[in-house]
Amino acid sequence: MDKKQNIAIFTTASLPWMTGTAVNPLFRAAYLAKDGQRKITLVIPWLSLKDQELVYPSNITFSSPSEQEKYVLHWLEERTGFTSGFDIRFYPGKFAIDKRSILAVGDISEIISDEEADIAVLEEPEHLTWFHHGKRWKTKFCHVIGIVHTNYLEYVKREKNGRLQAFLLKYINNWVVGIYCHKVIRLSGATQDYPNSIICNVHGVNPKFLEIGKKKIEQQQSGNQAFTKAAYYIGKMVWSKGYKELLTLLQDHQKELDGLEVDLYGTGEDSNEVHEAAKKLKIVVRVHPGRDHADPIFHDYKVFLNPSTTDVVCTTTAEALAMGKIVVCTNHTSNDFFKQFPNCRTYNDGHGFVKATQKALTEEPAQLSDAQIHELSWEAATERFLSVAELDQTSNKRLSKNPSKKFASTSLDVSRNLEDASAYVHYVASGFEVSRRVFGAIPGSLQPDEEQRMELGLAIPADNQSSKV
């Protein structure tokens, strides 16, 4: 009997931080493990207490990895309705305040033993490999799949000297993703293009939103008014998340949209500025603190306005469609997946936004078919992932895998040897504190510190032990 495929999913964040790379890989692990045909391990960052206090909301902290694991699995089971059959392991991480991101510490590929190293899924592969110093992912694992979540170039362009930074980052991303991934899945065309990549939305919607949508269909079919509120937007309250574009559209077209009332929900660094900008408009724009999108307060809104172009595939847009709402969004490549749904209305300019919004406010949302509801689900997202991930290649590579080799191959193929040489350059450059700091690594992130080793039960390196004797 063939042994089960081992799939290790590495990601860059964890609950209770409600960010896409915490939530979506968690659902991916649950649904890949659901049929019992594969052994799934989700590998997530562990933060020491001082970093937990910076990252996690509502003063939630954990004294041990097992405590956080219990929290994560409870949250997941409440939303999926079934007990998940995958393992959770932790790697040491540190929070980079300037990047608002968690970066890995040490060689996190070591979390998975060589015997289990069949397939690695790197959620945000560039993020996980910028500062990787250790065994080469392609050598350790038979098959490495990168899933690109974030449009880093778009964010960097908005910073000081943004175009130059984006130019450099583009080539760095191409370099590390190329040497560490066999296959790259881009959630939409809004991401950077990579060799050996395919565009496929392999994300689904939290089942709770589909349940809300089905109840709305029942209300519509029984002749009741399903939607009693007008328009809203929800998202992290920073200008780059669509707030600048939305408030500009509302300001430029106040006469055409006279009588429109819009509610904004979010919390973030630019909350005060968004409040002040909203007060200057003649249109009624109410600004509220952020909430869970599944909160009952959102159920009765009919129109979701989302002009953001920095998302790769906007989770809140998918959630709004799942709840049966009409979505008004820009005609942008990040929204291509949503255009198949009858309640998705796109626009090209300000006048198109006004027309789409006015029409949405006067119409009833179309009732989604069973096939359309399925397309938004994690079951469908898992089917799409399995169809493009090329997992069958693993068995062909397993016999030739040499786990003792750090990064190189013995191939006579010229292109392969050039790639090995490139990987060696990255290995050397990432091994010096000075060069790591130049490229933005957190100081002291080459190896876990003593506190992290104790919390995670990691072995102390031999040279450290000898120095204490």
Image (cartoon, rainbow, N blue to C red):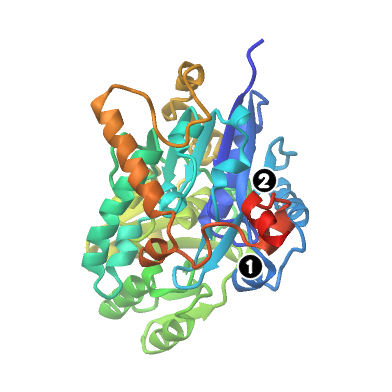
Spatial CA distance of label 1 from label 2 is 19 Å
**Residue under the point 32% across and 71% down:** 245
- Which one is in front, 37 or 3? 3
- Left or right of 342, for residue 265: right
- Which one is in front, 355 or 314? 314
Task: Specify the quadrant of the image occupied by residue 227.
Answer: bottom right
Above or below 226: residue 42:
above
Q: CB atoms at circles 1 and 2 under 8 Å apart?
A: no
Where in the figure is residue 347, as x and y percent of width and height?
27, 58
Task: Specify the quadrant of the image occupied by residue 197.
Answer: top left
Where in the figure is residue 140, as x and y percent of width and height?
50, 33
State the residue lying farthest toward the top: 1
Tell me the residue that label 2 is attached to.
89
Type of the residue with mark 1: Tyr
Work out whether residue 189 can be spotted: no
Q: Secondary structure at mark 1?
A: loop
- Left or right of 431, for residue 248: left
Around disc 1, counting alpha carbons within 10 Å, would you say few (fewer than 14), some (14 to 19), or many (20 or more)? some
Tell me the residue that label 1 is attached to.
56
**Residue under the point 55% across and 28% down:** 118
Whichever of callouts 1 and 2 sits on the residue coming sooner in the sequence is 1
Q: Secondary structure at mark 2?
A: strand
